[in-house]
Amino acid sequence: MMSRNRPTTACLINHFTYGAFVGDAIRSALEQTIAFDEVVVVDDGSRPQDLDQLRKARGSDPRVQLIEKTNGGQLSCFNVGFEHTRADILFFLDADDYWDPGYLAAALQVYERRPDISFVAASRRLCFADGTCKEERLVDRDVGFSVVRCHRHPHWVGAPTSCISARRTILAQFLPFDAHSTWRTCADECLVYGTSLAGARKFEMGAMHVNYRLHDKNAWHGKRQDASDILWRRLEGMRMCELLRNKFGLPDDLAALAPLEFRTVQLPTSRDFRHYREVVINSGLGMTSKLMALVDLSMTYWFGRKREPKK
């Protein structure tokens, strides 16, 4: 049962040259079974023909606010959109993706049931150009905190842009984030790592409501990446995490806290376990402390895998 005093919500759509798709994105936000309080569409200096399509797609719904700005990249769209809404929970949507009508209701159930959760990663349905789809379904689980996990190396604890929602209180700790020139694409990394290092408790939602389009105009997905592309993307991820660590005043080494943080992860996967082992092994802890931490992590992993999710 949804609370009558539910938190206010906003959909933030970032748009650049996706005029053929953006109408579906806006409609999917407006046709939710529980209405968004705001829909903010930020255009990043699109070509005139795409901007014309966007203006038509906006329609006359008073909830839809269209912001047109000069080109600055995806992160700049997140920054502008964030500053133009006061909603309690923000939902991010790429202009070429769209949601099923029950997405907002499903996510709000998580936030209302778990006030301690400040970030929800949703499952997604990959939608190919030939009309076929493939589901990438998550399991409902509390994935806990990830400050230690992302502290020295950008370990991913999240989801692509259109699958991300987060409380304003956690986003406000780092947005707007002044790194526009670097994160013109793939700025969902800023949302994922920023919320981790800001101390968000995260939840993975199994309900399948996000439709993630794959097509020849995708800015990142499906593009061939050579060694130099991968190298610089990883270096920029590490640089971003360093900027955020400094912003939050985090100590240089948090590895001693890895076993405690790992215990907040429900039904830990082998990937989760591997990440925490890497944190400890690559830390500055003494040999005895490392061994004790690794034993603790192993015990938590083997026994934690059998815990049932909370109802």
Image (cartoon, grey):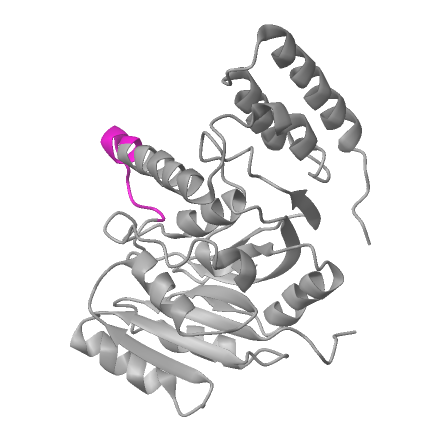
Left or right: residue 213 versus residue 310 is left
Q: Nearer the viewer, residue 170 or 294?
A: 170
Q: Quadrant of residue 25?
A: bottom left
Look at the image and say whether residue 107 sits in the magenta stretch. Answer: no
Q: Quadrant of residue 101?
A: bottom right
Q: Quadrant of the C terminus?
A: bottom right
Q: Is residue 132 visible?
A: no
Left or right: residue 4 versus residue 221 is right
Q: State the residue lying farthest toward the top.
A: 287
Give the extent of the magenta segment: 221-231
Q: Quadrant of residue 285?
A: top right
Residue 250 in percent (x, y) is at 49, 36
Residue 77 in percent (x, y) is at 33, 64
Q: Residue at x 69, y 31 (%)?
A: 260
Q: Is residue 99 visible?
A: yes
Left or right: residue 63 versus residue 277 is left
